[in-house]
Image (tube, rainbow, N blue to C red):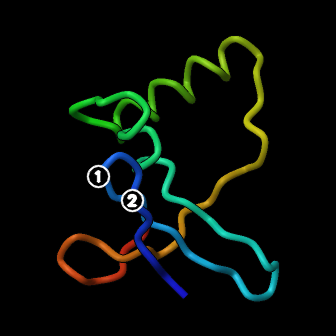
Amino acid sequence: MSSIKLFENKHIRSLWDDEHEAWYFSIVDVVSVLTDSPNPRKYWSVLKTRLKKEGSQLATNCSQLKMLSADGTKRLK
């Protein structure tokens, strides 16, 4: 089940996983909401690189999921 969540009038794509009984959210959409960055995908990429250089580890190894795009198709995000 896919859905769009709204936060301060901005879209955050989400996906429900029945097997794990958990919601997954598009990190790029979350970064966009939190930072107002004009390029949230680049912002996230730079942040991940900086965290790795500092020795920080992301909570999980995040893989891309197919999520609904603005044009209505599902793409890896």
Q: Whole-Å distance between the Cαs marked 2 and 1?
A: 6 Å
Near-viewer residue (6 or 42): 6
Does the CB distance between marks 2 and 1 fall below 8 Å? yes
Residue 59 lies left or right of residue 29; in this view the side is: right
User: Which residue is disc 1 drawn over?
Assistant: 9
Residue 18 lies left or right of residue 30; in this view the side is: right
Q: Residues within 10 Å of mark 1 (few under 14, many from 20)?
A: few
**Image point 67% across, 23% down: which residue?**
52
**Image point 29% across, 29% down: which residue?**
37
**Label tally:** 2
Mark number, residue 61: none
Residue 28 lies left or right of residue 37; in this view the side is: right
Q: Pinpoint residue 10: horizontal percent, then vertical percent.
A: 31, 51
Is 77 rendered above or below residue 59? below
Residue 38 lies left or right of residue 51; in this view the side is: left
User: Which residue is disc 2 drawn over?
Assistant: 6
**Image point 36% across, 81% down: which residue?**
74
**What amino acid is found at the position of numbered circle 1 in the picture?**
Asn
